[in-house]
Amino acid sequence: MKITVLPGDGIGPEVTREAVIIMKDVASAFGIEIETEQHLIGGAAIREKGSPLPKDTIDSCLKSDAVLLGAVGSPEFDHLPPHERPEVGLLDLRKALGGFANLRPAKAVPALIDSSPLRPEIFAGTDLLIVRELLGGLYFGTPRGFDDGRSGGYNTMRYSVPEIERVARVAFESAQGRKQKVTSVDKANVLETSQIWRETVTRVAADYPSVELEHLFVDACAMHLVTSPTQFDVILTENLFGDILSDEAAVLTGSLGMLASATIGSAIGLYEPVHGSAPQIAGRNIANPLGTIASAAMLLRYSAKNETAAAVIENAIDKVLEEGYRTADIAPENYSQTVSTEEMGSLVAERAAGSVKRTTSHAV
């Protein structure tokens, strides 16, 4: 496999380095040869090449089997017009790769149950997957712009039936391998696009009779995520709603640094942690690499098609947390087992290596 690695900005290079080491080691153990090529994106690309998504970066991505991204964004570029800022590089990359379904899992890790802002009895047992449509809606709809003199602004929310159908099928197929339930989230009492969304999802559901379908308005879903999150299995929703709800779900786990994501639907998957570039802690070797490491596991699952290799990494993360190791974002004050970014990466790599030995020897 050829994988383009885009460390990006802030803590991106630190957390990506750990993820790449673990991904290569585990992949090799299962006979997957990985070749990586590193390129610039976001603020780092603006600084070096004057563009948030240089031509050599996008060319490498389009020739790859998958892309692993660290983080994008830097306050030093906040003075630039919106279309020239680092974040545009990520939006343009998503559009160029063509992945239309963003998968964001959120799961209660028993070792971190006290890190959630929710009471343990509410959050314990939570295991949900948000499937977010990624190439439509307000973020890409046209026309968009400003009124004369910037006296106002306007955006267009637009969805076609084929766009909704294809992401709905990803949600239903995901649910078939989970708890057999899809919650479709919209605002059909107000928005015409949501009415088309609900009609289309209902029609697609008929092809998956084993999967239960329920519909929720987005405001109700936001409330239920913090009052009874265990009721959810797969949440399916459009771009803007998915952006907001997935960050809400991520925070429930105690830290954005824990959460991974995968963008699929095209030949080239894009894998990235949910967290941002966190420039205030960049270069201090204290960032949590687990979200990026888990994103690398998703790469092995969806692009390399190797569920066992992905599970080895995910189980290694759980093992390290069970043993009490924490990075600063998930550690209580004055905690004795707080470790650095590099130390956490090394711990996960060691546990993964041990798991690989047990897995391969059992297979023999």
Image: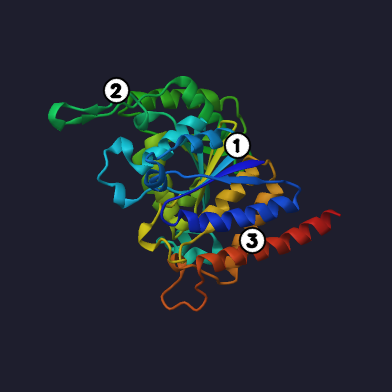
**Residue type at mark 1?**
Ser
Which of pointers 3 and 1 indicates the residue nearer the eye?
A: 1
Mark 2, secondary structure of its residue:
loop
**Residue type at mark 2?**
Pro
Identify the residue shown where x is 43% and y is 73%: 332
For label 2, the residue is: 143
Which of pointers 2 and 1 indicates the residue nearer the eye?
A: 1
- Left or right: 101 in relation to 64: left
Residue 16, image x, y percentages: 53, 54
Cβ atoms at labels 2 and 1 below 8 Å apart: no
Whichever of callouts 2 and 1 sits on the residue coming sooner in the sequence is: 1
Quadrant in the rendering for residue 317: bottom right
For label 3, the residue is: 316
Residue 160, image x, y percentages: 43, 21
Label 2, label 1: how far apart the Cα atoms are: 33 Å
Label 3, label 2: how far apart the Cα atoms are: 47 Å
Count numbered badges in the picture. 3
Label 3, label 1: how far apart the Cα atoms are: 27 Å
Pick whichever, 337 or 104, lies toward us: 337
Is the residue marked by circle 1 packed among few (<14), some (14-19), or many (20+) residues within 10 Å?
many
**Residue type at mark 3?**
Ala
Residue 64 is tagged as: 1
Identify the residue shown where x is 74% and y is 53%: 29
Tell me if residue 264 can be seen.
no
Mark 3, secondary structure of its residue:
helix
> Which of the image's four quarters has the C terminus?
bottom right
Whichever of callouts 3 and 1 sits on the residue coming sooner in the sequence is: 1
